[in-house]
Amino acid sequence: MEAIASSIIPLLRETQVAAQSLRSLTDEQRQELLHKLADFIAEHEAEIIIENKKDLVRMEDSNPKKDRLLLSPERIKGLVESLKNVAKLPDPTGIILSEKTLENKLSIQKISVPLGVVGIIYESRPNVTLDVAALCLRSANACVLRGGTDASYSNNCLLDLIHQAMKACGLDQRAVCLLPTDRKFVRELLTAKEYVDIIIPRGSQQLIDFVRQHATVPTIETGAGVCHTYVSASADLEKAAKIVVNAKVSRSSVCNALDTLLVDQAVASSFLPMIVEGMKAYEVEIFADKTAYRVLKDAKYPQLQQAEPADFGREYLSYKCSIRVVSGIEQALEHIHTYSSKHSEAIISENERLCERFLREVDAAAVFTNASTRFTDGGVFGLGAEIGISTQKLHARGPFALEKLVTEKWVVRGNGQIR
C-alpha cells in the first residue's frame, strides 16, 4: 500500500500484465462479460443511486457540472442498454485488413489488434467509467481510469460492479484500474510510456491543454465543443426555431449543445422572436451582438446581455449562449472558422446548394444540415457508446468508439525464406 500511495506505477504495471490475458479471450467471452455487467448494473441500481447522491450533495445546484454528475434511474437504464448494445457490435479485433502472397511464397497479412492499455482522464461524468470499461473490454484492451474527485463515490461503486462481473466470468480484474484522484498522479500517468499505450482526455479545454502540454504518452483529444448553428436567409424559420431551442436546452451541460447562434440579417428580425418562448422557459442567458440585442429587447426577452468579444468561442456548458447576426454565408463561415473547436456545426437552410457548400467547407468532426447538433453521440450514431468526441484528425475523429480502439499488426508467415 505504501508503494501505491507514493506512486501509481505498481498499479499500471499490474494493468499491463492483465492486458495480455485479455488478448486470449474469445469474442463470445467478451460478449458474455458485458451482458453479465449489464445484469449487475440493473440489479444494483439502488446502490448506485445512493453512492451517486453522496457525490451530488457535495456540489452546488448552480454548478453546470451537476447535471453530468447525476445518475438517475432513467440514465442507469440507458447505461444498461448501452452495455447490451456494445456487446452486440462486431468484434473490431482480428480483422484481416489486407493480405498478399509474394513471389517467394511469403504470406503477409495486416490485421487489427487491441491498442493495449488505454488511459482515460475525465471529469464529473460517472457514466464514462462504465462506457470506457465496456468499450475497452469488448475490444480486448485494458483501461486505466482517472475520474474526478466530484464523482469518486459513484466511480468506485461502478468499478466494484465491473470487478464483480469480471470475477464472475473468471477474468483478471486488474484489467480495469481506477486511479486515486490525487492530482499528483496525473503527471505520472501522462509520462508512463512503458505501461500505457494511449491517453484520452475527456473534459474541459483546460484539461485537454494540460494533457497536451505534459503528456509523453501518445494522446487523442476528446471533449471540448464550441458548437454553432447558422440560420440562413433561406431557412424554414419554424423548423429552425425548434432545432435551435433543442440544441441549447435539451441538455445544456454536454459538449454537443449549442454555444453560438448565427442568424442571417435578412431573417433576424422575424426569426429571433420565435425562439423567445423556448429559451425563456429554461431561463437561458443570451449574450447578443448589437443587432440581436435590439430585436430581443423589443421582444421583451428577460435574460439578455450585450455580447463582449469573449462571449464568442466560449463553451458554455450551461443555460447560456451567444448570438451574432451575420451578413450571409461568407461571414457565417468566417465566424465558424475563427471560433469553432471543430466539434459539431450546423446550418438550417432550404437551399440544397448552400447546405452542400456548408458541409464541404466547414472543418469539424460532425456537420449537420437542418438538424440539432445534439445528435453528435456514439450511441445515436449506432456505435453503442463512446469514449468521447475526438476533435483532432489522426486515428479517430468524431465519436471515438469501439471501432477505433484498435491498431494494426503485420503478420508474416514463411517457410525458410531469406533475404
Image (spheres, rainbow, N blue to C red):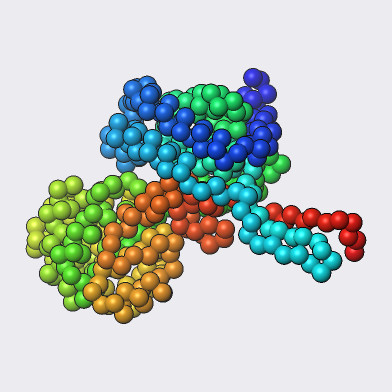
Find residue 191 and report its image quarter: top right
Depth check: 91 or 346 in front? 91
Is 306 situated above or below 218? below
- Please give left or right for residue 231 compared with residue 213 in the image: left
Of residues 38 and 57, the one nearer the viewer is 38
Question: x and y percent of residue 411 in the render?
Answer: 74, 54
Q: Is 239 placed above or below 76 here?
A: below
Q: Residue at x 51, y 33 (%)?
A: 32
Q: Quadrant of the C terminus?
A: bottom right
What residue do we see at 51% from left, 38% from top? 31
Position of residue 375 in the picture relative to residue 97 (left or right): left
Residue 365 in view, yes or no: yes
Taking depth in this image into account, of 203 and 367 the one nearest to the observer is 367
Whether residue 259 appears in this view of the structure is no
Q: In the drawing, does residue 208 fall left or right of residue 344?
A: right
**In which quarter of the view is residue 118 placed?**
top right
Q: Is residue 24 left or right of residue 176?
A: right
Q: Residue at x 60, y 39 (%)?
A: 26
Q: Quadrant of the N terminus?
A: top right
